[in-house]
Image (cartoon, rainbow, N blue to C red):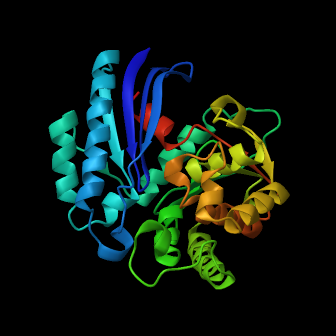
Amino acid sequence: MTRVAAIDCGTNSIRLLVADLDPTTGELKDLDRRMQIVRLGQGVDRTGRLAPEALERTFAACREYAAVIKGLGAERLRFVATSASRDAENREDFVRGVVDILGVEPEVISGDQEAEFSFTGATKELTGHPHIQLPYLVVDIGGGSTEFVLGGEAVRAARSVDVGCVRMTERHLHAATGGSGAPLSDPPTAAQIDAIRADIAAALDQAEESVPLTEAATLVGLAGSVTTVAAIALGLADYDSAAIHHSRISLATVREVTERLLASTHAERAAIPVLHPGRVDVIAAGALVLLSIMERVGAEEVVVSEHDILDGIAWSIA
Protein backbone atom coordinates (compact mmCIF):
# COMPACT_ATOMS: atom_id res chain seq x y z
CA MET A 1 0.00 0.00 0.00
CA THR A 2 1.11 3.55 -0.76
CA ARG A 3 -0.20 6.38 1.43
CA VAL A 4 -0.95 9.46 -0.62
CA ALA A 5 -2.71 12.79 -0.24
CA ALA A 6 -4.67 14.48 -3.00
CA ILE A 7 -6.14 17.98 -2.98
CA ASP A 8 -8.66 19.21 -5.53
CA CYS A 9 -9.16 22.97 -5.47
CA GLY A 10 -12.08 24.04 -7.63
CA THR A 11 -14.18 27.13 -8.12
CA ASN A 12 -16.48 26.50 -5.16
CA SER A 13 -14.80 23.97 -2.86
CA ILE A 14 -11.43 22.59 -1.83
CA ARG A 15 -11.26 18.92 -0.96
CA LEU A 16 -8.72 16.59 0.60
CA LEU A 17 -8.30 12.82 0.32
CA VAL A 18 -5.69 10.88 2.26
CA ALA A 19 -5.78 7.24 1.24
CA ASP A 20 -3.87 3.98 1.09
CA LEU A 21 -3.70 2.65 -2.47
CA ASP A 22 -2.73 -0.70 -3.90
CA PRO A 23 -2.12 -0.33 -7.66
CA THR A 24 -1.92 -4.11 -8.14
CA THR A 25 -5.44 -4.78 -6.80
CA GLY A 26 -7.08 -1.42 -7.54
CA GLU A 27 -7.98 -1.01 -3.86
CA LEU A 28 -8.33 2.52 -2.46
CA LYS A 29 -8.89 2.83 1.29
CA ASP A 30 -9.95 6.24 2.61
CA LEU A 31 -8.18 7.50 5.70
CA ASP A 32 -9.56 11.04 5.58
CA ARG A 33 -11.87 12.69 3.04
CA ARG A 34 -13.10 16.22 3.71
CA MET A 35 -14.38 19.32 1.97
CA GLN A 36 -14.69 23.03 2.63
CA ILE A 37 -16.65 25.59 0.64
CA VAL A 38 -14.19 28.45 0.05
CA ARG A 39 -15.62 29.96 -3.18
CA LEU A 40 -12.17 30.59 -4.68
CA GLY A 41 -13.90 31.57 -7.92
CA GLN A 42 -15.84 34.42 -6.31
CA GLY A 43 -16.21 37.11 -8.98
CA VAL A 44 -13.67 35.58 -11.40
CA ASP A 45 -16.15 35.42 -14.27
CA ARG A 46 -16.71 39.17 -13.89
CA THR A 47 -13.29 40.51 -12.85
CA GLY A 48 -10.82 37.93 -14.16
CA ARG A 49 -9.04 37.96 -10.77
CA LEU A 50 -9.05 35.96 -7.54
CA ALA A 51 -10.49 38.10 -4.74
CA PRO A 52 -8.25 38.64 -1.66
CA GLU A 53 -10.92 37.30 0.70
CA ALA A 54 -11.38 34.20 -1.48
CA LEU A 55 -7.63 33.56 -1.40
CA GLU A 56 -7.56 33.88 2.38
CA ARG A 57 -10.45 31.42 2.81
CA THR A 58 -8.61 28.97 0.59
CA PHE A 59 -5.30 29.40 2.43
CA ALA A 60 -7.03 28.83 5.78
CA ALA A 61 -8.35 25.50 4.46
CA CYS A 62 -4.87 24.63 3.19
CA ARG A 63 -3.42 25.18 6.66
CA GLU A 64 -5.98 22.78 8.11
CA TYR A 65 -5.24 20.20 5.41
CA ALA A 66 -1.49 20.49 5.98
CA ALA A 67 -1.98 19.43 9.60
CA VAL A 68 -4.12 16.43 8.56
CA ILE A 69 -1.60 15.29 5.93
CA LYS A 70 1.28 15.53 8.40
CA GLY A 71 -0.68 13.73 11.10
CA LEU A 72 -1.51 10.79 8.84
CA GLY A 73 1.99 10.56 7.40
CA ALA A 74 1.16 10.69 3.71
CA GLU A 75 4.22 9.89 1.61
CA ARG A 76 3.29 11.99 -1.41
CA LEU A 77 0.98 14.92 -2.10
CA ARG A 78 -0.48 16.22 -5.34
CA PHE A 79 -2.44 19.48 -5.43
CA VAL A 80 -4.58 20.09 -8.48
CA ALA A 81 -6.33 23.38 -9.19
CA THR A 82 -9.08 23.71 -11.73
CA SER A 83 -11.35 26.27 -13.36
CA ALA A 84 -11.11 29.39 -11.18
CA SER A 85 -7.33 29.44 -10.96
CA ARG A 86 -7.04 28.64 -14.68
CA ASP A 87 -9.04 31.77 -15.49
CA ALA A 88 -7.46 34.23 -13.06
CA GLU A 89 -4.94 36.91 -14.00
CA ASN A 90 -3.38 36.84 -10.52
CA ARG A 91 -3.10 33.08 -10.16
CA GLU A 92 0.58 33.47 -9.15
CA ASP A 93 -0.63 34.87 -5.80
CA PHE A 94 -2.54 31.62 -5.33
CA VAL A 95 0.46 29.49 -6.32
CA ARG A 96 2.82 31.25 -3.91
CA GLY A 97 0.40 30.91 -1.00
CA VAL A 98 -0.08 27.18 -1.54
CA VAL A 99 3.66 26.54 -1.81
CA ASP A 100 4.27 28.43 1.44
CA ILE A 101 1.67 26.37 3.31
CA LEU A 102 1.91 22.89 1.78
CA GLY A 103 5.37 22.83 0.20
CA VAL A 104 4.06 21.78 -3.22
CA GLU A 105 3.13 23.83 -6.22
CA PRO A 106 -0.48 23.56 -7.31
CA GLU A 107 -0.85 22.15 -10.79
CA VAL A 108 -3.24 24.34 -12.73
CA ILE A 109 -4.38 21.58 -15.05
CA SER A 110 -6.11 21.84 -18.38
CA GLY A 111 -9.74 20.95 -18.87
CA ASP A 112 -8.70 17.77 -20.69
CA GLN A 113 -6.52 16.66 -17.77
CA GLU A 114 -9.34 17.46 -15.37
CA ALA A 115 -11.68 15.32 -17.46
CA GLU A 116 -9.31 12.34 -17.47
CA PHE A 117 -8.83 12.44 -13.69
CA SER A 118 -12.60 12.63 -13.19
CA PHE A 119 -13.15 9.65 -15.49
CA THR A 120 -10.55 7.51 -13.73
CA GLY A 121 -11.86 8.34 -10.28
CA ALA A 122 -15.49 7.70 -11.19
CA THR A 123 -15.16 4.54 -13.25
CA LYS A 124 -12.28 2.54 -11.80
CA GLU A 125 -14.59 0.59 -9.49
CA LEU A 126 -17.43 0.37 -12.05
CA THR A 127 -15.42 -1.69 -14.53
CA GLY A 128 -17.00 -5.13 -14.84
CA HIS A 129 -20.13 -4.16 -12.89
CA PRO A 130 -22.86 -6.52 -14.18
CA HIS A 131 -25.63 -3.90 -14.24
CA ILE A 132 -23.75 -0.95 -15.70
CA GLN A 133 -23.26 -0.82 -19.46
CA LEU A 134 -20.44 0.70 -21.47
CA PRO A 135 -19.62 3.26 -22.68
CA TYR A 136 -19.89 5.71 -19.80
CA LEU A 137 -20.45 9.41 -20.14
CA VAL A 138 -18.88 10.93 -17.04
CA VAL A 139 -20.13 14.44 -16.28
CA ASP A 140 -18.35 16.49 -13.62
CA ILE A 141 -20.39 19.62 -12.84
CA GLY A 142 -18.14 22.06 -11.04
CA GLY A 143 -18.43 25.65 -9.96
CA GLY A 144 -16.89 27.20 -13.04
CA SER A 145 -16.76 24.43 -15.62
CA THR A 146 -18.27 21.09 -16.54
CA GLU A 147 -16.26 18.19 -17.91
CA PHE A 148 -17.67 15.60 -20.30
CA VAL A 149 -15.76 12.35 -20.79
CA LEU A 150 -16.89 9.42 -22.91
CA GLY A 151 -15.15 6.08 -22.62
CA GLY A 152 -15.09 2.49 -21.49
CA GLU A 153 -11.81 0.91 -20.49
CA ALA A 154 -10.15 4.16 -21.53
CA VAL A 155 -11.13 7.71 -22.45
CA ARG A 156 -12.43 8.07 -26.02
CA ALA A 157 -13.30 11.77 -26.04
CA ALA A 158 -13.35 14.65 -23.57
CA ARG A 159 -14.29 18.30 -23.43
CA SER A 160 -14.40 20.95 -20.72
CA VAL A 161 -16.83 23.85 -21.12
CA ASP A 162 -17.24 27.02 -19.06
CA VAL A 163 -20.58 26.38 -17.44
CA GLY A 164 -20.96 25.59 -13.74
CA CYS A 165 -23.11 26.34 -10.72
CA VAL A 166 -21.11 29.36 -9.48
CA ARG A 167 -20.51 30.82 -12.94
CA MET A 168 -24.22 30.58 -13.87
CA THR A 169 -25.34 31.98 -10.52
CA GLU A 170 -22.98 34.95 -10.65
CA ARG A 171 -23.75 35.65 -14.30
CA HIS A 172 -27.55 35.52 -14.06
CA LEU A 173 -28.54 35.47 -10.37
CA HIS A 174 -25.85 37.83 -9.08
CA ALA A 175 -27.99 39.43 -6.35
CA ALA A 176 -27.75 36.23 -4.34
CA THR A 177 -23.94 36.23 -4.41
CA GLY A 178 -23.09 39.90 -4.05
CA GLY A 179 -22.22 40.48 -7.70
CA SER A 180 -22.76 43.63 -9.70
CA GLY A 181 -25.94 44.86 -11.32
CA ALA A 182 -29.48 45.55 -10.25
CA PRO A 183 -31.07 43.33 -7.61
CA LEU A 184 -32.71 40.25 -9.08
CA SER A 185 -35.78 38.40 -7.91
CA ASP A 186 -35.75 35.60 -5.39
CA PRO A 187 -36.75 33.02 -6.56
CA PRO A 188 -35.47 33.50 -10.12
CA THR A 189 -37.83 34.71 -12.82
CA ALA A 190 -38.66 32.72 -15.93
CA ALA A 191 -36.45 35.08 -17.95
CA GLN A 192 -33.45 34.46 -15.68
CA ILE A 193 -33.95 30.70 -15.88
CA ASP A 194 -34.22 30.92 -19.67
CA ALA A 195 -30.93 32.86 -19.76
CA ILE A 196 -29.18 30.12 -17.78
CA ARG A 197 -30.71 27.46 -20.03
CA ALA A 198 -29.43 29.32 -23.09
CA ASP A 199 -25.88 29.38 -21.72
CA ILE A 200 -26.06 25.69 -20.85
CA ALA A 201 -27.40 24.83 -24.30
CA ALA A 202 -24.55 26.73 -25.96
CA ALA A 203 -22.04 24.90 -23.75
CA LEU A 204 -23.58 21.54 -24.66
CA ASP A 205 -23.26 22.45 -28.32
CA GLN A 206 -19.55 23.06 -27.70
CA ALA A 207 -19.20 19.76 -25.84
CA GLU A 208 -20.85 17.88 -28.71
CA GLU A 209 -18.21 19.18 -31.11
CA SER A 210 -15.75 16.84 -29.37
CA VAL A 211 -17.83 14.29 -27.46
CA PRO A 212 -20.69 12.28 -28.99
CA LEU A 213 -22.93 12.72 -25.96
CA THR A 214 -25.80 10.50 -27.12
CA GLU A 215 -23.59 7.44 -27.63
CA ALA A 216 -23.33 6.79 -23.88
CA ALA A 217 -25.07 3.77 -22.36
CA THR A 218 -24.58 5.01 -18.78
CA LEU A 219 -24.50 8.58 -17.50
CA VAL A 220 -22.30 8.98 -14.41
CA GLY A 221 -22.63 12.25 -12.49
CA LEU A 222 -19.98 13.72 -10.21
CA ALA A 223 -19.36 16.59 -7.80
CA GLY A 224 -21.40 18.61 -5.34
CA SER A 225 -24.30 19.71 -7.51
CA VAL A 226 -25.02 16.11 -8.53
CA THR A 227 -24.54 14.56 -5.09
CA THR A 228 -26.67 17.28 -3.48
CA VAL A 229 -29.51 16.73 -5.96
CA ALA A 230 -29.25 13.01 -5.16
CA ALA A 231 -29.33 13.67 -1.41
CA ILE A 232 -32.47 15.79 -1.80
CA ALA A 233 -34.07 13.21 -4.09
CA LEU A 234 -33.36 10.45 -1.58
CA GLY A 235 -34.96 12.50 1.21
CA LEU A 236 -31.87 12.43 3.42
CA ALA A 237 -31.91 14.50 6.59
CA ASP A 238 -28.12 14.36 6.83
CA TYR A 239 -25.53 13.88 4.13
CA ASP A 240 -24.79 10.15 3.79
CA SER A 241 -22.03 9.31 1.31
CA ALA A 242 -22.78 5.58 1.44
CA ALA A 243 -26.43 6.12 0.52
CA ILE A 244 -25.57 8.57 -2.27
CA HIS A 245 -22.68 6.63 -3.83
CA HIS A 246 -23.94 4.68 -6.87
CA SER A 247 -27.52 5.72 -6.28
CA ARG A 248 -29.59 5.96 -9.46
CA ILE A 249 -31.74 9.06 -9.82
CA SER A 250 -34.32 9.16 -12.58
CA LEU A 251 -34.78 11.99 -15.05
CA ALA A 252 -38.27 12.62 -13.68
CA THR A 253 -36.89 12.96 -10.13
CA VAL A 254 -34.05 15.27 -11.22
CA ARG A 255 -36.63 17.45 -13.00
CA GLU A 256 -38.84 17.51 -9.89
CA VAL A 257 -35.93 18.50 -7.59
CA THR A 258 -34.70 21.13 -10.04
CA GLU A 259 -38.13 22.73 -10.42
CA ARG A 260 -38.50 22.77 -6.63
CA LEU A 261 -35.14 24.49 -6.19
CA LEU A 262 -35.79 27.05 -8.92
CA ALA A 263 -39.17 27.89 -7.37
CA SER A 264 -37.70 28.31 -3.87
CA THR A 265 -36.41 31.43 -2.18
CA HIS A 266 -32.93 31.52 -0.66
CA ALA A 267 -34.48 31.03 2.78
CA GLU A 268 -36.51 28.04 1.62
CA ARG A 269 -33.45 26.37 0.12
CA ALA A 270 -31.46 27.08 3.28
CA ALA A 271 -34.13 25.18 5.25
CA ILE A 272 -33.47 21.94 3.34
CA PRO A 273 -31.65 19.88 6.01
CA VAL A 274 -29.18 18.09 3.75
CA LEU A 275 -28.13 21.20 1.81
CA HIS A 276 -24.67 22.51 2.77
CA PRO A 277 -24.83 26.25 3.60
CA GLY A 278 -22.13 26.93 1.02
CA ARG A 279 -24.31 25.53 -1.75
CA VAL A 280 -27.60 27.29 -0.93
CA ASP A 281 -27.09 30.10 -3.45
CA VAL A 282 -25.71 27.96 -6.29
CA ILE A 283 -27.58 24.64 -6.11
CA ALA A 284 -30.52 25.72 -8.28
CA ALA A 285 -28.19 26.58 -11.16
CA GLY A 286 -26.22 23.37 -10.60
CA ALA A 287 -29.37 21.27 -10.69
CA LEU A 288 -30.43 22.97 -13.91
CA VAL A 289 -27.08 22.09 -15.49
CA LEU A 290 -27.63 18.43 -14.57
CA LEU A 291 -31.21 18.40 -15.84
CA SER A 292 -30.22 20.04 -19.11
CA ILE A 293 -27.46 17.47 -19.66
CA MET A 294 -29.82 14.56 -19.02
CA GLU A 295 -32.36 16.00 -21.44
CA ARG A 296 -29.74 16.53 -24.16
CA VAL A 297 -28.16 13.11 -23.69
CA GLY A 298 -31.51 11.33 -23.50
CA ALA A 299 -30.59 9.69 -20.18
CA GLU A 300 -33.43 8.17 -18.18
CA GLU A 301 -31.27 8.13 -15.05
CA VAL A 302 -27.94 9.27 -13.68
CA VAL A 303 -25.62 7.01 -11.67
CA VAL A 304 -24.24 9.21 -8.89
CA SER A 305 -20.62 8.73 -7.84
CA GLU A 306 -18.94 10.02 -4.71
CA HIS A 307 -15.63 9.05 -6.31
CA ASP A 308 -14.45 11.63 -8.77
CA ILE A 309 -11.50 13.81 -9.71
CA LEU A 310 -10.09 13.56 -6.17
CA ASP A 311 -9.79 9.77 -6.48
CA GLY A 312 -8.35 10.19 -9.97
CA ILE A 313 -5.66 12.50 -8.60
CA ALA A 314 -4.82 9.94 -5.90
CA TRP A 315 -4.51 7.16 -8.50
CA SER A 316 -2.25 9.35 -10.62
CA ILE A 317 0.20 9.51 -7.70
CA ALA A 318 0.19 5.74 -7.21
Question: Can you see residue 151?
Answer: no
Q: In the displayed structure, does residue 26 sit left or right of residue 80?
A: right
Q: In the displayed structure, does residue 146 sit left or right of residue 105?
A: right
In which quarter of the view is residue 282 placed? Answer: bottom right
Which residue is found at the position 48% from the left and 45% from the top?
A: 117
Which residue is found at the position 38% from the left and 72% from the top?
A: 45
* Residue 101 place in picture, x, y as percent: 19, 36
Which quadrant is the N terminus positioned in?
top left
Q: In the displayed structure, does residue 277 sit left or right of residue 205?
A: left
Residue 288 vs residue 192, the one in the foreground: 192
Q: In the displayed structure, does residue 111 sit left or right of residue 74?
A: right
* Residue 249 place in picture, x, y as percent: 78, 48
Which quadrant is the C terminus positioned in?
top left
* Residue 237 place in picture, x, y as percent: 70, 37
Residue 133 vs residue 233, the one in the foreground: 233
Residue 151 vs residue 286, the one in the foreground: 286
Check the image and report above or below for 311 versus 53: above
Check the image and report above or below for 268 versus 60: below
In which quarter of the view is residue 204 placed? Answer: bottom right
Check the image and report above or below for 115 versus 49: above
Question: Can you see residue 202?
Answer: yes
Q: What is the count of numbered marks? A: 0
* Residue 8 place in picture, x, y as percent: 40, 43
Residue 217 vs residue 233, the one in the foreground: 233
